[in-house]
Structure formats: C-alpha cells, structure tokens
Amino acid sequence: MTEHNDNMTEPDLDLGRRMAMPFRTVAAMATAGVRSRLGRSAVTLFGVVLGTAFLMAAGTADILRSHFANEERDRVVAATAAVNAAAELGTLDGRTLAIWVDEPGRQARWMLERLRTLGDVRLRIVVPTGDFPAEPGERVNDRNESLDSASALIICNEGATQGYALPTRVESLGEQIVMDMAGQYNAEQLATRGLRYRHLLGEGSSADLGGFVAVAPIQATTLGGRRTWIIAISLVVSGIGIANALLMSVTERFREIGTLKCLGAPNRLVVQLFMIESALVGLIGSLIGLVLGWFVATGAASTGYGWALVWSNLPWPEIVRFGGLCLVMGIVVAMVAAIYPAIVAARMMPADALRSEV
C-alpha cells in the first residue's frame, strides 16, 4: 500500500512542478485574459484613467501656476493700473488717451489690453525703443503728436528710476491728468502747472495689491490642501471601482479558475495572473490618463495665460517627473485594488468552481 501511494503521488508532484510556470508564460496568459475580456477590462481601465487623469491634471495645474507666477503677478498689476486709470477718468467711452511706453514690458502691454476692455477708448501709443507691439492701439512717432485731442496721458514706466521731463504741450490735455505706473512724478510740482497726477499703483491701490500678494499664498495653501483631499478621495474611489470590476471578473472565470486548480495550479499562480492583469490594465489606463490630464491642465492654463505664452514656456522636466509619479500611482492603485479579488479567486475550491454556472 505504501508503494502504491508513492506511485500515486509521483504524478501529482510532476504535475505541480509543471504548473510552476515561468513568469513569461504567466504574463502571456494574463495578457490573453485581458484581450479575451475586453468589456470587463474596459470597465477597470476606465477607473484607472479617471483617477490618473485627475491626479495629473491637478498636479500639472499646480506646476504651471507656480511656473507662471510672475505672469500672474504682472497681470494683477496691469489690471490694477487699468482699473485705477478708468476710475480717475470716470469713463473711458469716447476718450482718447496718450500712451508713452518708456519701459516696454508685459505689464504695459497687459494694461493697455485691459483698458480696451473697460471702454470704447482710443489709444495713441508712443514707443521710443520701437520694440513694443502696437496692436492695443494706434502707433504714433512723436510724443507731442500723441497729445493731440487726448484727454489724459498715461506713462508706462514700470521699473524706471527717474521720470521723463514733460513738455509744455502736456498742459493742453483735455482732463489735465498725468498718470504713470512707477510713481516718478511729484504731484505738487505738476499741480503748479494745472495738472492732476495719479500714481496708478499708489494711493491705496498698492495696498490693495499688497493684500493680494499677502493673501495669495494662504489661498494657495488652502486650495492645495483641498486638492490633496480630493485627489486622495478620487484614488480611493477609483480603487474601489477597480476592485469591484475585478471581483465581477472572478465570477465570470469560475470554470477557468477551477480548471487551472484541477490541473495543479497553486494559489500563487492564480494570484499572479490577477496581479499581472491589473498591472497591465493599470499601465495602459495610467498612460491614457496622463495624456488626458495633461491636455486638460495645459488647456486651462492656456485659456488664462494665453496659448503662445504657455506652449512656448512649458516646464517639461517638472511635468515629466510628475507624470512618472502619476504613472506609478496608477499602477500601484490598480494592483492594490486587485489584491482582495486575487485572494478570493485563489481560495476557491476546484469542485465548487467547476459546478458554478454564470
């Protein structure tokens, strides 16, 4: 009897050794399983895509916001200057403004663009250096010529160290108002000439701007904390969806699992199949999610900052590093979500699996 039992166990041992497949074979089986169940794989893939896309979009938006922080600050300064100029004049409709761009820069350009949106105003622009685009208004060659029929004078001198000597013709301005961005003129001296002076970033406006600068980091920190919670919740929800889809996959594969176990497949092999399938789906879904999230975040930033500025100054090293992190996170979430379904499948009794009808 002992010899007979030994002979009976020998084939079982050989079969067990045969079922100890190399990893390449197990991976090929898992890939074939994904292809044969495209519908169920698509459900799992969709969960990975959503989670990774949200993570990539949120992270890329933070990277772009930090990268273009100077642009955002300059836009705030330009908008503040434009609003103060409009407030000083009461209304911009039907007025002509002389614009002297002594220091061409982003703030000056954005301020002029902002003025055009605040009213039906005519801008007569003088740029001594000649390297400032004239699209926001009419380009003129002479400072005195720009003053013809002008209600007020705005001097764009951001970063200037000294004020430009104003000619006598300035006193003929309709509203007799001189405004600048750098605060380089003396209001009392101009008052002796019958001119009113306004520092566009001073007299209360600089305090408002300082408040914005002080509050912005607090708002960024608050938004960052909220975004972290939203991302964490989205990853958890994605993981639950993936686990649910894989559990449904287990019920569809009762006979396949039972057949494998009857042929001598150890529990470890069944777990490997599920884990490799989830890793493969996680990889594909994460790649799709990366592209989708990047397009969403970059498109949103382009709408706010301008397509030309964003697409010509993308911080690729930071984006690529964060994309790699998102890729790893997507694969890890998919594999973690597959642990419980894989254990359920591995613990199934072969006879129970073969008797199941799905």
Image: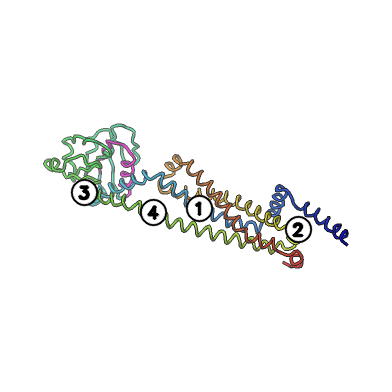
Q: Position of residue 4 (x, y in %)?
A: 88, 60
Q: Earlier in the sequence, mark 2 or mark 3?
A: 3
**Secondary element at image label 4:** helix
**Secondary element at image label 2:** helix
Mark 1–mark 3 CB contact (< 8 Å): no
Q: Position of residue 49 (x, y in %)?
A: 56, 54
The circle on residue 203 is: 3
Please identify the quarter of the rendering in which residue 337 is found: bottom right
Q: Is residue 352 magenta?
A: no
Mark 4–mark 1 CB contact (< 8 Å): no
**The C terminus lies in which quarter of the figure?**
bottom right
C-alpha span from label 2 to label 3: 81 Å
Q: Amino acid at mark 1?
A: Leu
Residue at the spot x=56%, y=52% of the render?
Answer: 330
Q: Amino acid at mark 3?
A: Glu
Look at the image and give the residue range highlighted in magenta.
97-117
Label 3 vs label 4, nearer the camera = 4
**Residue pointed to by mark 4:** 221
**Residue pointed to by mark 2:** 260
Around disc 4, counting alpha carbons within 10 Å, would you say few (fewer than 14), some (14 to 19), or many (20 or more)?
Answer: few
Q: Earlier in the sequence, mark 1 or mark 3?
A: 1
The circle on residue 55 is: 1
Depth check: give the residue in front, 57 or 166.
57
The circle on residue 307 is: none
Residue at the spot x=53%, y=52% of the render?
Answer: 53
Instruction: Give above or below for 26 relative to 101.
Output: below
Q: Amino acid at mark 2?
A: Leu
C-alpha span from label 3 to label 4: 30 Å
Residue at the spot x=88%, y=62% of the render?
Answer: 1
Depth check: give the residue in front, 31 or 342.
342
C-alpha span from label 2 to label 1: 38 Å
